[in-house]
Amino acid sequence: MDRRVWGALGTGAGLAAAGAAYATWVEPRWFALRRVEVPCLPSRATSVRVLHLSDLHLVPRQRIKRAWVRRLADLRPDLVVDTGDNLAARDAVPALVDTLDGLLDVPGVFVLGSNDYFAPGLKNPLRYLDDSHDRPVRTGAATPGQHGPGPADPTDRGRLPTEELLEALTGRGWVDLTNARARLEVAGLRLELVGVDDPHLEYDDYCVVAGPAADDVDLTIGVTHAPYRRVLDAMSRDGAGLLIAGHTHGGQLQVPGYGALVTNCDLDTARASGLSRWWPGAGSTPSTEAPDDAAWLHVSAGLGGNPYTPFRFSCRPEATLLTLVPAR
């Protein structure tokens, strides 16, 4: 091999090492606040600001993330929607409460994700989005507000302190939408909210909260951790005007100019993060024309990830301030 070949190989290896270092140490700490306008309100409604948080996957030692999230309270949102996967360690609940402290004084709603029930584990980096081993199945019929697989065994190191998390959030006034419906008045806007438990673990049971959107509210919002099509279809079929989800991490590793390669669910990669339209069957039809009554769907790329696979590339961790405005 001549010097030019060795030089090219050396350059390639150096670029690969630099890219890996950037994806592991720089971008996961380069947090972004997205601002998105959603035209989903009645014509005479006043705009409302909704802060969407998702996938913190918090470990107490993450000081940079915690400080950044804490400053979001300065935005003074009218409502906070947390779409789950808050924890990544058994001792993370006190750190989470401290991190969200200012936001817990704001009206809020939440649903749970798999990493609110089970701690993340060490994985092959090539399978960083495959957590099929974390799919325990609930037995028996769900009831509104029922959570996950049942009481935790204190000897099970894989279980997270879900009940402690629930008490911390509901104790500060946030509404638990786990297989539940609720109504809130926010900044003069009458909202109906419907949520499910984590569809990725098959804990969702939409049938216990199904029903047409109420006529006496300004907007019905569907909330889920993982944006599986069966849940999005059911919520939009019932008349939800806005659907809010997380889970995908925006693909976590995106190809510049192309986008996400995977979503870790059956949502198409074009909707891996950001705002789009959704209607029953949208994910399985080639049509790009949304009907007039299609819901708006917002999927967050989230603020964290499995601590054992912390990398991100071309997909910064994010929170989103959604400004809901009258439909045009």
Image (cartoon, rainbow, N blue to C red):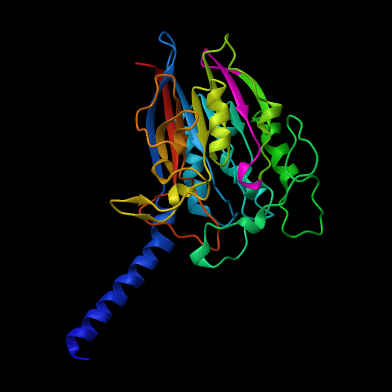
Q: Residue at x 44, y 55 (%)?
A: 28
On screen, 22 above or below 78? below
Q: Position of residue 106 (x, y in %)?
A: 57, 27
Residue 12 sits in quarter: bottom left
Question: In the figure, is residue 328 to the left or right of 151?
Answer: left
The magenta-colored residue range is: 184-201
On screen, 35 above or below 39? below
Q: Position of residue 265 (x, y in %)?
A: 53, 47
Q: Residue at x 81, y 59 (%)?
A: 155
Q: Residue at x 27, y 81 (%)?
A: 10
Residue 175 in view (yes/no) = yes
Residue 102 in view (yes/no) = no
In this view, the residue in front, 93 or 176, is 176
Q: Quadrant of the C terminus?
A: top left
The stretch drawn in magenta includes residue 199: yes
The stretch drawn in magenta includes residue 253: no
Q: Quadrant of the N terminus?
A: bottom left
Q: Residue at x 66, y 44 (%)?
A: 202
Question: In the figure, is residue 145 to the left or right of 281?
Answer: right
On screen, 182 above or below 285? above
Q: Position of residue 177 (x, y in %)?
A: 65, 31
Q: Position of residue 63 (x, y in %)?
A: 52, 53
Question: In the figure, is residue 247 to the left or right of 41?
Answer: right
In this view, the residue in front, 225 or 101, is 225
